Image (tube, grey):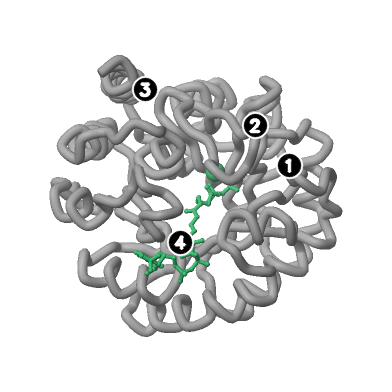
């Protein structure tokens, strides 16, 4: 392995890190957070979600946040999009990339987006097609790729079925999410063995949450198996409001350290990531005590 081989980290804290926070964080603080993450050197940042504010009130200011950020050269600023209405708003904000989200679990799908898996495929089809027609890359998340908070263990074959449908509809990258941080390294090995039949491991993104302190071990296993794209959140912020017991995402600073220890470059300044995460934690604490 060359010492210059790269790992690409998509920083998801502004979206996945904040969506669970009950007290509204000022739009200005969210903008500063994204700008600090840009300064840290991330090449991809998931800025916000264009979803129903009834469902995720924290991100009701998606347009303002998106319009307020200072875009870095060559940085991809993506956004989660729930439906065609969300896509229209996202296109108005000139997003660089769209992310659609499905689940391998029926129960989670119903709770998260009020639709079955089949209904959600119908819902995302025009989103994917219109985004691609507008020249944008589209990420396709598969939530509950290892375990569902309501159904328990999820067979890798169920993940493959949903992932294959997403690829068929035109997503440009596939993101396998361990929504509740249930995975141990063996689960990641089995998952990638299954999904490698439809997408190369090197082109797969892994989205880990850190519930049992196993996320880093899972990332190490994934790196050794050939994964080069990960999502992570500064300060380990986050969780999904519709996944009980889903705590923070894998912390970006821990993932960056792991990548470095394993001989990979990321181009991201870890100390700036730690600072950005700490500053956002102070904002969250200030809102909680206000
Ligand atoms: P619904 O209630 O079935 O549908 O929600 P609706 O069409 O009746 O919409 C409800 C209300 O939202 C209506 O307003 C709509 O107009 C409005 P009302 O008439 O009640 O005043 N609305 C919108 N407003 C703004 N922008 C929109 C939009 N769409 C509808 N785009 C829906 C269905 C999909 C909209 C809803 O369930 C939703 O927005 N869900 C999003 C849930 C979410 O964001 N969850 C967290 C992200 S997923 C995640 O964290 C997992 C991930 O990190 C990977 C992993 O770890 O697994 C990605
Ligand atoms: Mg997540």
Left/right placement of residue 173 relative to residue 153 reads: left
| Sequence-first disc among 2 and 1 | 1
| Sequence-first disc among 1 and 4 | 4
Judged by depth in the image, the label closer to the viewer, 1 or 3, is 1
Is residue 202 visible to the viewer in this orientation of the structure?
no
Judged by depth in the image, the label closer to the viewer, 2 or 4, is 2
Q: Which residue is mark 4?
A: 99
Residues at marks 4 and 3 touching, judged by CB atoms closer than 8 Å = no
Separation (CA) of disc 1 from disc 4? 22 Å
Residues at marks 2 and 4 touching, judged by CB atoms closer than 8 Å = no
Of residue 88 and residue 78, the one placed in the foreground of this image is: 88
Residue shown at 75% from the left, 46% from the top: 148
State yes or no: Cβ of the residue under disc 1 lies below 8 Å from any atom of ligand 1.
no
Image location of residue 252, percent across then percent down: 46, 29
Q: Which residue is mark 2?
A: 245
Separation (CA) of disc 2 from disc 1? 8 Å
| Sequence-first disc among 2 and 3 | 2
Separation (CA) of disc 1 from disc 3? 32 Å
SS at badge 3: helix
| Sequence-first disc among 1 and 3 | 1
Separation (CA) of disc 2 from disc 4? 23 Å
Separation (CA) of disc 2 from disc 3? 28 Å
Q: Which residue is mark 1?
A: 149
Judged by depth in the image, the label closer to the viewer, 1 or 4, is 1
Q: Which residue is mark 3?
A: 270
């Amino acid at each position: 392995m060359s010492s210059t081989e790269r790992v690409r980290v998509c920083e998801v804290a502004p979206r996945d890190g904040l969506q669970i926070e009950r007290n509204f964080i000022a739009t200005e603080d969210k903008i500063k957070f994204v700008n600090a993450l840009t300064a840290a050197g991330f090449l991809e940042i998931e800025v916000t979600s264009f979803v129903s504010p009834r469902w995720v009130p924290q991100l009701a200011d998606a347009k303002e946040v998106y319009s307020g950020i200072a875009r870095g050269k060559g940085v991809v600023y993506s956004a989660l999009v729930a439906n065609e209405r969300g896509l229209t708003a996202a296109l108005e904000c000139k997003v660089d990339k769209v992310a659609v989200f499905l689940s391998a679990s029926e129960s989670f799908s119903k709770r998260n987006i009020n639709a079955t898996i089949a209904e959600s495929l119908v819902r995302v089809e025009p989103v994917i097609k219109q985004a691609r027609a507008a020249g944008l890359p589209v990420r396709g998340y598969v939530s509950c790729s290892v375990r569902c908070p309501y159904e328990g263990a999820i067979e890798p074959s169920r993940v493959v079925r949903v992932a294959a449908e997403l690829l068929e509809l035109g997503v440009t990258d596939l993101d396998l999410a361990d929504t509740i941080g249930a995975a141990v390294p063996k689960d990641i090995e089995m998952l990638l063995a299954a999904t490698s039949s439809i997408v190369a491991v090197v082109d797969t993104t892994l989205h880990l949450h850190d519930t049992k302190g196993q996320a880093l071990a899972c990332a190490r296993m994934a790196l050794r198996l050939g994964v080069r794209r990960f999502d992570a959140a500064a300060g380990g912020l986050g969780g999904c409001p519709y996944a009980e017991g889903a705590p923070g995402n894998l912390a970006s600073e821990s993932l960056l350290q792991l990548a470095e220890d394993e001989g990979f470059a990321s181009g991201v300044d870890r100390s700036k990531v730690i600072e950005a995460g700490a500053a956002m934690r102070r904002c969250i604490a200030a809102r909680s005590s206000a």
